[in-house]
Structures are given as C-alpha cells and as structure tokens.
C-alpha cells in the first residue's frame, strides 16, 4: 500500500509538472498578436453604400466590422456569395509573422472561424470554407503555422463555438426571433465539435480561443457542453491551452487561463494566468472608416500594466482584403517593437511585485535572481520633481540604472524606510515609458 501510494504521488507530481510546463510559455510571453480576418474583411464596414454604424442596433458601441452581416441585416445568400470575392492576392504569411516577431510578440492567434461561420481552412465538415474561394488549394492557416514555427512564435486559433450564422442550427444574435426554434445540439455535434477536432488534428495549435462574452451564451454553453469541448481538446492534445471565454458565465476549473472582456484591464492581481484581448482602433476586423487609433505609447502602457499584474496583452489587427496589414497598424507595431527591443527584459518572464508602495503612475515588475531580485519600475506618467519614490530600504539596493541607456542613477534614503531616485531630465517631446532597474539583495 505504501508503495502504491508513493507510485501515485510520483505520477501526480509528474502530471502537475507537465501542467506547469504547458502554461509556462504563456506566462512568460506577455505580448501576442490577434487577427480577425475573413469574408467580412472584404466589406471593410460598408455594404451597398451603407457604412457601419448605421442601424439602431449599431449604437456606437459594437459596430465591429466582423458583425456587418447582422448589423446591416445582409441576407445569408448575399453575404455568403462573398466567398467568390475572397482573393487576398498580396497575402504573405511570412510578412505578418515577421511584423509580429519584430513587435516583440511571442504568440499569434487568428480567427479560424468567426461568428459568420466561414472556415479559413479547407474543412471536411463544411463547404463554407476557403476551398470555395479563389484561394482554393492554398492552406492559409498552414502557411501561418509554418511561419510561426520559423520565427519561433506559439500559435492558436479563435473558434466561434456557439455563434454560427451559416449553420441552420448555430446560435444567432439575441435580437433574432428565429433563434428560439434552433436545435443547437445538432450544430454542436455536426459542426462545432468536428471542426475543433479538425483544427487540432491538422495544425496542432498551442492555444484555442473560444468566445463567449456575457450571459447570452449561458443557455447554450451549459457546463456539460463546456466540459465536452474541453475533454475533446484534452483528448487530442497534451499542449493546447484553453481560454476562459469558452464559458465566460461559468468557466469551471479546467480552463488554462482567464480571458478579460474586450479592452478590459483588471485592477488587481488574479489567481490564474490571464490576458486582455485588445483593439488598436475600435473594430476587430478591417473597417476602412475606423480612425480611432490608440497611440503606441498608450498601448505599451496597457501592456506594461498588465505585465505588472501578471497578465498578457493580446493586441488585434484587422488585415485588409488584399491580405496586407493596415499601415497605421504596422507603424504602431514597429513603434512598440522599438521600445520592446530595449525594454523587453523588464516585461517578458517577469512577475508582479506586491506591497511595495511607489508613485502613482508607476508600475513594478520583478525577476528573482540568486540572492535577491531585480525590480523594474516602469514610469508611465510624469513624476513630481522627476523623482521616483520606492518603499525599499536603501541598504538593500545594490545599484540602479536606466534600462534604455544603462546610465547609473543615485539612490538616496528618503529618511524613512524607502528611497528616492531622481531621473535625468526628459525630452519633453518623448512620451516613451522610462524604466529603472534595481538590483535588490534578499
Ligand atoms: O463578438 C466578438 C467580436 O466580434 C470579437 O471577436 C471579440 C474579440 O474578443 N469577441 C466578441 C465580442 O466580445
């Protein structure tokens, strides 16, 4: 009996070690690229002379271009005829993934199937897929997966597991009366589960990104269905991570990481790995009239704040119908990449730091090292007197330097239990985040 007990405890340790390893890349990655690309990209937010937002339903809040079929009430046959027009002649997987890599992103997630039901791969389960377009014969997802492998990025797929506007029994938005008469179980068994299986067997993803966002999915994604889907993924893959939005209303205990609401940033630390899916402008998919671009400085601040709370930042791009990335998005990626190039050490594989008071507008990350830790102070806002305050005893701090230049900074006791560190004068036109790096003894 003792031997048996020992045996099981070794097995249990091995299982939990594997679990830890499975998620460890995600916990270190901090920054990923999200892509919304499909038939809706052809329209770019405009159909038959009408541009979103245009209806009472598109009330300025969710006029996402990938929702155009519903928001502008495009009949199924008209929308589905777009397959003939999906011909992104300038698509080059290498270029996309190179941009992600140079931006400092460590993983890539693309909409294999969004709510419209169109599959971006040649699916045996449905004919509403890439094989029906002029691109037939090309394996878009395969090309992206190969590029991710080439550039060392992890990769995953967004799969709309409940909303499906093509299948006669998939979920449709709550305001459509026809919704009630649908036999969701049929869709679930005929399309949702088999397509997830296909994606895993064909492309072996590191992550699956399921999408529910409120109570609307509760009726359909019951705990039993949620678990059925999770168990399918687990059966087919020992590495694939699953996000909490598989059932936002009740994610259960078996998911791998929490997914925040869109563009939502938690105020406190969470007890599971997590990420924020975020947009660069308002929409997710390409919208030619959406000029609400956030600055790269703003987005870096989101990224760094998330890192300081142990979370990732999954930043979305909506490629154009010709397969290129929008120039304003490319510029922002490159600006962020330039900062990440010199400051990545303060972001990747760092941990949050609890209970060290500092200035408002400063966030902290840390790394454990032998005999102590490295603390990074990210200065997001202007500091009073250009001076950082940190509640750490002076005799514990071995030295302090500015990450970008390596310039050493003087650490002074604040006469109490903390220190002050003054920063060099700042170029008033430069809005970049400055980071101080401190070696701190145990
Ligand atoms: O309805 C979708 C939306 O189109 C987009 O895919 C986002 C990404 O997080 N998720 C849903 C809304 O939360």
Image (tube, rainbow, N blue to C red):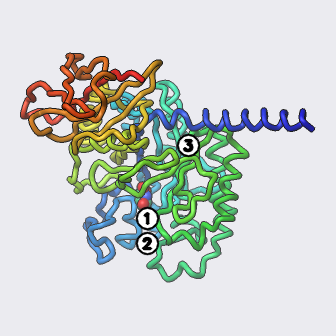
Task: Identify which residue, 76 or 331, lies in the foreground.
Answer: 331
- Return the residue found at the far front: 416
For this view, does 40 lie left or right of residue 167?
Answer: left
- Tell whether label 1 touches label 2 (CB within 8 Å): yes
Rendering coords of residue 268 (x, y %): 39, 51
Rendering coords of residue 182 (x, y %): 60, 77
State whether label 1 is within 8 Å of ligand 1.
no
Q: Is residue 227 visible?
A: yes
* Of the image marks 1 and 3, the number of the one nearer the N terminus: 1
What is the number of the mark on residue 79? Answer: 1
Q: CA distance from mark 1 to mark 3?
A: 29 Å
Residue corresponding to mark 3: 207
Q: Nearer the viewer, mark 3 or mark 2?
A: 3
Q: Quadrant of ligand 1?
A: bottom left
Badge 1: how crowded within 10 Å, few (<14), some, or many (20+)?
some
- Figure quadrant of the C terminus: top left
Disc 2 is placed on an element classified as loop
């Amino acid at each position: 009996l003792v031997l048996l007990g020992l045996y099981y405890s070794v097995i249990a340790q091995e299982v939990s070690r594997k679990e830890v390893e499975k998620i460890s890349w995600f916990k270190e990655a901090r920054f990923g690229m999200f892509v919304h690309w499909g038939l809706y990209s052809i329209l770019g937010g405009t159909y038959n002379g009408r541009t979103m937002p245009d209806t009472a339903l598109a009330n300025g809040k969710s006029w996402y271009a990938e929702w155009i079929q519903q928001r502008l009430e495009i009949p199924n046959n008209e929308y589905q005829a777009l397959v003939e027009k999906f011909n992104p002649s300038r698509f080059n997987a290498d270029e996309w993934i190179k941009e992600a890599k140079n931006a400092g992103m460590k993983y890539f997630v693309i909409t294999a199937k969004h709510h419209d039901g169109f599959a971006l791969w040649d699916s045996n389960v449905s004919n509403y897929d890439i094989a029906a377009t002029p691109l037939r014969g090309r394996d878009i997802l395969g090309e992206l997966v190969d590029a991710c492998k080439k550039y060392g990025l992890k990769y995953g797929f967004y799969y709309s597991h409940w909303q499906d506007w093509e299948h006669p029994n998939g979920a449709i938005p709550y305001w459509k009366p026809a919704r009630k008469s649908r036999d969701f179980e049929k869709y679930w068994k005929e399309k949702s589960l088999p397509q997830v299986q296909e994606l895993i067997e064909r492309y072996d993803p590191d992550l699956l990104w399921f999408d529910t966002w409120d109570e609307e999915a509760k009726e359909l994604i019951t705990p039993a269905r949620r678990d059925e889907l999770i168990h399918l993924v687990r059966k087919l893959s020992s590495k694939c991570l699953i996000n909490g939005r598989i059932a936002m209303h009740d994610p259960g205990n078996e998911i791998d990481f929490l997914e925040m609401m869109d563009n939502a940033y938690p105020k406190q630390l969470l007890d599971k790995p997590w990420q924020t899916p975020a947009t660069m402008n308002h929409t997710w998919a390409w919208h030619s009239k959406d000029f609400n671009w956030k600055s790269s400085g703003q987005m870096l601040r989101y990224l760094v704040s998330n890192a300081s709370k142990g979370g990732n930042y999954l930043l979305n791009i909506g490629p154009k119908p010709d397969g290129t990335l929008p120039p304003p998005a490319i510029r922002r990626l490159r600006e962020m990449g330039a900062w990440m190039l010199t400051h990545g050490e303060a972001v990747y594989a760092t941990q949050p730091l609890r209970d060290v008071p500092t200035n408002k507008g400063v966030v902290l990350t840390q790394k454990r090292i032998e005999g102590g830790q490295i603390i990074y102070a990210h200065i997001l806002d202007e500091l009073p007197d250009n001076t950082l305050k940190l509640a750490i005893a002076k005799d514990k701090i071995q030295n302090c330097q500015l990450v970008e230049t390596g310039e050493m900074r003087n650490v002074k006791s604040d006469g109490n239990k903390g220190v002050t560190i003054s920063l060099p004068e700042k170029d008033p036109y430069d809005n970049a985040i400055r980071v101080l790096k401190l070696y701190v003894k145990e």
